[in-house]
Image (cartoon, grey):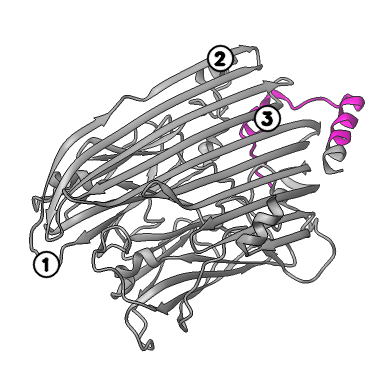
Amino acid sequence: MAVSFFFIFFICFSILQIPLFSTATIHKRALFRPNVTTQQDLSPKNDTPTTYFEVTNPIKLPKTKSCSYLVLKHDFAYTYGKPPILTNYTPPSNCPSKKFSKIILEWKATSKGRQFDRIFGIWLGGVEIFRSCTAEPRPNGVIWTVKKDITRYSSLLMTNQTLAVYIGNIVDSKYTGVYHVEIFVHFYPTEKVRNPFKGFDSGADLIVPISRNLPLNDGLWFEIENSTYVQSKEFKIPQNVYRAVLEIYVSFHENDEFWYGNLPNDYITANNRSDIAGNGAFREVIVSLDDVVVGAVWPFTVIYTGGINPLLWRPISGIGSFDLPSYDIEITPLLGKILDGSSHNISFSVTNALNVWYVDANLHLWLDKKSVKTEGKLLEYSSLPLSFSLASNFTGLDGSFLTNARRSISMTGWVKSSYGIVNTRSSQSLSYSNYMVMGNDANLQVVDQTIEFNDTVYAKTRSFSVQVLESLKKFQLHMYSDGVEIGDKSYAAISNVTLIFDEKRLKYGSSASSVHNLQNAQGYMLVKDQSLDSGLGSTQQIYKYNNDKGCYFRNISSSNYTVLYDKVINSCSKLINTVS
């Protein structure tokens, strides 16, 4: 029924022959960017604050009793261009045990009034542990809670650190939303002793921040402003490391918030439209060690809570918007290059970037406690140049564009430690396809994009295999946006969005876990003077997760701030019966 309504809505505008958007507004339309906030409360009349949430797999907790404490409580008002909020972090002193099998970060926030979505981050000792987007408030208020498993940062959480939180918020007479925030950490004591060989199944012994140093009047992330920008950080590691993993945090903003809808430069030049975001629809984050490419990130297309049509994400937020994914790159084969006790350099760049990308990293290191020095050697390295093609077919403002790209990176090396000589091979294989159509004098834009992002780590001693890990990711996006101008500084727009996040993790060649996350959203809006005057948004989502410990399934739908149905299955047998 919703689809029929949107179709009728569009036909009505066509019959009335209301003028299409003037070309002066193309840059906003082509970027799917409404750049609006809610002028009035469009939800059903209710004084109760709305609870926003992201659909994801609940964290499986141990049976042990948690030790919890409030790390920070703060009201984020006008914080843009000011230093991050800092507090002293100390490990819990009230726990009977000092060994924990699960550590959970809990973010709780409320806001009331009018405000844009704001990206924010949390750093502990310079190590980023959480990146997220705020919910856009409403007059009667919003509430949202995010829980993240931060067990992988255990070694960091066991020492005194400085915790930093940055939200670039602006509060004035028009944008009144203040974010009232509480941050908790919950520690769950371990139930059993772990395997003494910790290289692949436990958290790192040391985590080195690859981020900017305090003091700052911004977040600790690096800012990549264009395709020629390279941001870097020097670091030095202990000489008894036997494994190294680089964890990358990425988010995209301003002219590249909707990079997957950016138009090719030849189109912009031909139409004399320098105000349109360009450089095409392909982006990749390149990570280099001492100027040698060691990995690439082709990120999932996270849509923030104000993106495209803000009404789409109320109360169900977009995939990844409340907990942006990070991306791991195994660099163990390269340890022989950096175990010399000298300083080295990790750098970041973004292919085709426009202003602005926020990128930083955490270097996770596993230490050999039985030796003061390990040895290593790089045996093989291959990084083929990016394979890229663009086929443009346009006349005037309308046309189609097909972009394809491929990249592969692999490396093999050995490390000698008290565990023996371990040979490790790490590889990445990435493919990308984006088909874009512009119509109705560039007021209509359709994007179909697929990214396949596969990582493999194979480690073995001379006598047996230590670990085989594979991560097979597939990110899909379909987006439709059309609109008409209906007067001075006013327009109406229709948007349909499909997001799919699929990942399968394999261990020793057999399935260890899989997630299928499918989200469909449809909406229309009437905008007057950059304020959302009226509209409607609906979202349907299917989330399915399974691993060797259990299954989780959720089928949920919402419309106009209201959850229409919500079905949850926690049993694998019930899930099989439901699917079959």
Report the side of 16 relative to 317 (left or right).
right
Badge 2 or badge 3: first in the primary sequence = 3
Q: Identify the magenta region.
A: 7-36
How many tags in the picture? 3
- Separation of residues labelled 3 and 1 (CA atoms): 64 Å
Which residue: 71% across, 20% down? Answer: 441
Instruction: Residue 370: give its label.
Output: 1
Which residue carries the number 3 mark? 25
Which residue: 57% across, 37% down? Answer: 476
Q: Quadrant of residue 271?
A: top right
Which residue carries the number 2 mark? 392
Report the side of 8 relative to 420 (left or right).
right
Which of the two marks, 3 or 1, is nearer to us in this view?
Answer: 1
- Separation of residues labelled 2 and 1 (CA atoms): 59 Å
- Looking at the picture, which amino acid does disc 1 mark? Lys
Does the residue at mark 2 contact the one at mark 1 (Cβ under 8 Å)? Answer: no
